[in-house]
Image (tube, rainbow, N blue to C red):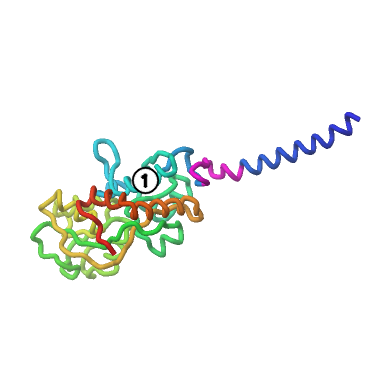
Amino acid sequence: MSVRTALPVTAAAAAVALLLTGCTSTKSEGGKGDKGGGVQFVTEGVLKTCTHLPYPPFQTKKGGEVVGFDVDLVDLIAEELKVKQEIVNTPFEGIETGQDFSTNKCDLAASGLTITPERDKVMDFSVPYFDATQALITRKGKPYKELADLKGQKFGYQKATTGGEYAKKNAPKSAELVEFEDLGLLLAAVKSGQIAAGINDNGVLYDYVKQNPDTEVAAEFDTGEQYGIAVRTGNDALRAKIDEVIEAAKKDGRYDEIYKKWFGTAPESK
């Protein structure tokens, strides 16, 4: 009789063990924890943000800490999820190709990242949170007011950016295009006269000329760009939470406070 009762108990135990194993593997797929109302994280209790420094005023190092507009905005998301934000500084190319998501380097990317159809194929974007356009930076007093003025000149852009794509499509054929790994190197080349002009998003260029009055934003190009916070394709729970926080912050004034902090003025109402 003991043998007869032992067999079904063993079978039942095996079935329960199989069920529990299945549940565990689903929950911990990719080494992710599960907190924040169904949102999964690369590292439990931490919201890892991929960015590429420097890119002030969106993200930059100050006193050993990474600060900026994007940092403050993502802090609101982390607070809602009851976790801490951790900044992961990584080459921009890894962000914009989606590689950093496929290797579980981060949960989201906030890096002044323009929403484009090409990027949308390899990652998912939040609702837009910032309007941007491309601009031209030169040393003050130089006669470069449009791209046509750069004939025969060295013209710089940042690698893997929409500014780089704009330069390749619209610069004069005789202009020598020079690629830089990051914004800091591009701006230093303009300031030193290594290149005649550089192109990047207007927000970062206006921030730079405030601190460097020997440079100026000579022109803007109406590219109609918008920034979004990116997540791994299919990470709908996190994307929905990001959208929820951005929209709530715009309604209750927290977004405007952060905007004023970093840009000195309220955002234009639409």
Q: Tell me the amino acid under the disc marked 1.
A: Leu
Residue 216: % across, % down: 14, 57
Nearer to the camera, 195 or 110: 110
**Farthest residue toward the left?**
141
Write the residue at 44% across / 43% down.
81
Residue 33: % across, % down: 52, 40
Nearer to the camera, 248 or 145: 248
Q: Quadrant of the N terminus?
A: top right
**Farthest residue toward the right?**
1
Nearer to the camera, 165 or 72: 72
Residue 270 falls inside the magenta stretch: no
- Residue range in magenta is 25-38
Is residue 228 shown left or right of residue 214? right
Residue 28 falls inside the magenta stretch: yes
Write the residue at 21% across / 65% down.
220
Give the quadrant of residue 5: top right
State the count of labels: 1
Disc 1 packing (10 Å; few <14; some 14–19; many ≥20): some
Write the residue at 36% across / 47% down.
74
Residue 217: % across, % down: 16, 59
Q: Quadrant of the C terminus?
A: bottom left
Determine whether 16 is above or below 210 in the image: above
Is residue 92 shown left or right of residue 56? right
The answer to whether residue 100 is seen in the rendering is yes
Determine whether 69 is above or below 21 in the image: below
Residue 26: % across, % down: 60, 45
Classify mark 1: helix, strand or loop. Answer: helix
The answer to whether residue 185 is seen in the rendering is no
Residue tagged 1:
76
Determine whether 172 is above or below 120 in the image: below
